[in-house]
Image: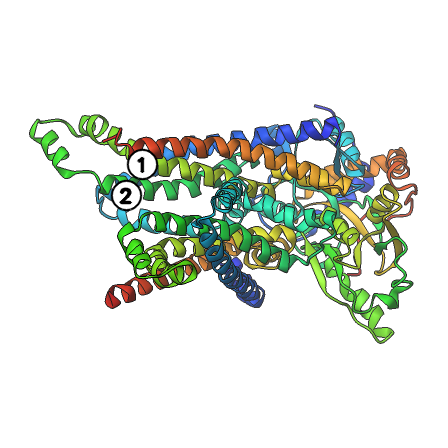
Amino acid sequence: MGTGDYLALAAGAGNTIAISLLAIAIGTPLGLGLALIRWGRVRGLDGVVATLVSLLRATPAVTLVLLVYFALPTVGLEVPRFAAGVATLTLGSMAYNCEIWRAALLAFPRDQLDAACAFGMPRGLRFSLVVLPQIARAALPALVNEMTLLIKVSPAVAVIGVTEATRAAVRIGATTYNPIPPFLVALAIYVVVIGFFVATQRMLERRHRAGLFA
Amino acid sequence: MIPHGIEVLWEQRDAMLAGLATTLAIAAASAACAGLLGLLLFALLISRIRAVALGLTWLIDLMRCVPFMLFCYLIYYGLPSFGIVIGNLMAGIIALTIYNAAYIAELLRGAFAALPREGIEAGQAFGFHGWRLLVRIILPPVLLSSVPMLGNQMVQIIKDSAFLVIIAVQELTFAANEIQATYYVPFASFVCAMLLYWGLCLAVEGGVRAVVAMAEVRR
Amino acid sequence: MAALSLTRRGVLLGAAAALATTGVAKALTLAEIKKRGYMTVATEDDYQPFEFTKDGKPTGYDQELLEMFKKSAGFEVRQDIIPWTGILPGVTTGKYDAAVTAILVTQERMKTLDFCSPVVESIDYYLKRKGDKKIRGIKDLNGLSLGVEAGSAMLKMLPQLDDMLKATGGKLGKIVSYQGYPEAYQDLALGRIDFVVNTRLSLESIAKSKPDTFEIGEPVSKPTYIAWAVVKGNSELLATLNAFLLGTRKDGSMYALQKKWFDTTFEHMPEAPTADV
């Protein structure tokens, strides 16, 4: 493999990381938003969110990215390629995160909320000071697990032409007919990136079990 | 434009349904094989021989860092470098099997770790060892408590089968893509595929609920 | 803004195109493009020798023609490089103003697209592994598995090969549809399929770059034309592109590019594309 190839793989890795981080950054709070809508039993919206989440969790990333990039423009929503990739990963992640946040919210002890109400805490303050810190700690291991799943599904954006790490490796293999070296490099890239997240998740789980969190 | 799309889809329904059938067949075959392989790996994971258990844990951890799409390419385009050339359908099923077997082994191990130790110790006191201990004492509660997570894994297999489009397997997403590329109806085509995947997943979830309900009755 | 020089023929072509029934109204007309300041085109990402990436930069016959057009256009031309299956739907649904890529002109496509003046003439050939004694002539293709690009005109034209085989008592074997030709060539080299069907020009390109692996066979279709396309009814944009293309024929730059990329020139192509298929 020549230096040109290594550069192409590095650029691909950069794209993978960029797309994944953006999708994680947007998808995690969006998932919380959806979970809150369901937790608050907002009339009408509750059912819509439940259906949307169920639908998104069932859709493969490849199918979703093709829909976002090729089909949405026909109903007026133009999406540039990189953004379509980020949007697809965000949508999938958001649906899974909604369920994770919801589980944490449902496990939240009601008596703390009642106590906060008794003290006359306004809703916003109640949420940000009492609820959010605790559910964030409880949900963290599962959220980080979801982040690793997102990175593992990120090569799906290659089918709309985004040159992320996997596609870069495949391209090199398709011209040299010697695919193993670029595949191994791409593999190493993913192991490092995902390994970082998995190690973080393990550490969080251990601290959770040790009772360092409420 | 959308009514036109639905019209075209109805005309092309055979192609779409053929894709759906292929997806189903691949998912079923892979799930069965992954289940069996996963059970075997699980047995090895909880083995007394530390080298085996540790080595396998290591391999499974490595596997969980690999994106499925890359794994698919590795099996299909990488193996020929070692002289092993397999057709795309076989390669897809093998990739799905190995990949998901690792996850199934891991989730069974998690269920096993959550089991109360007393049951197993009682079994050992009564003279159950090795295979018999595994099959009669360990597996039933492990499998029963894992049913929802196994259902999740089944859904994962169905979704991962869509990646096989990259090695020219003519499953559902491939069918939808070919229809839209030929008749220019991307919205109808992909929404239809999405709804079909949703249907499959709802069926799996329904199945899981039925199994759990049956298990409750038996208990 | 550079003055657009329309030759008389360009005007006639434009008028003829304008007489065609209007199609999807979503694509921008020339006036709207000028107002917006830029035009969007789609190119395939790996289709040698028409458009492909070398050392990270897009290059190829269509790419070089497009570079020449960008210089003379007078507005910005934004190029998006995407897989084949997204290009034609992208044009008919208005996502892109034009597809600047090697599209085979077929009657079916002429229902929804307006084709520009042809850029090359083409015939489909088959490609086989070098030294494959199993295939000595077309009739040996009977029952063998073949690779072709998904959703392509080459796939649509396979019935012509089927007819040829039927005439010698055979028929087409298994057809494997790939997302792109590089994967098909790779599988041919690996022995998973027995031959690949593609335009002669593309096959010559791959046979030249890998002479120890592949060799070209014989024609398996009737001659057709390859052209760029805009959505049906987008007549002024069509006229602009045609004016440019016919200009490159007149000053010889198109033939120079053909010589560079195909080692041959097609100097007797009609000005408006036609299709037997």
Type of amino acid at the residue the image marks with label 1: Ala
Q: Is residue C124 above or below residue A204?
A: below
**Chain that bears disc 1:** A
Q: CA distance from mark 1 to mark 2?
A: 8 Å
The reply to whether dot 1 and dot 2 touch (C-beta < 8 Å) is yes
Q: Amino acid at mark 2?
A: Ala
Q: Is residue A17 above or below residue B155?
A: above
Residue on which the image places disc 2: A103
| SS category of the residue bearing label 1 | helix
Residue B116 visible to an observer of this rendering:
no
Residue at image point 79% right, 35% down: C65
Q: Position of residue C245 (x, y in %)?
A: 80, 38
Image location (x, y in percent) of residue A104: 27, 39
> Where does the image place residue A56, in percent across and percent down from the top left?
41, 48
Q: Eyeballing the image, is B84 above or below C94?
A: below
Q: Residue at x 30, y 57 (%)?
A: B125
Q: Which residue is pictured at 56% across the width and 50% down the height? A: B163
Q: Chain of mark 2?
A: A
In this rendering, position of residue B138 left or right of residue A130: right
Question: Which residue does the image show at 14% across and 33% down from the upper left?
Answer: A112
**Count of marks placed on residues:** 2
Q: Which quadrant of the view contains residue C234?
A: top right
Quarter occupied by residue B140:
bottom left
Quadrant location of the C terminus of chain A in the rendered image: top left
Q: Are marks 1 and 2 on the same chain?
A: yes
Label 2, secondary structure: give it: helix
Q: Position of residue A60 (x, y in %)?
A: 49, 50
Judging from the image, the colouring scheme is: rainbow
* Direction from residue B5 to residue B133 in the image, left or right: left
The circle drawn on residue A139 is 1
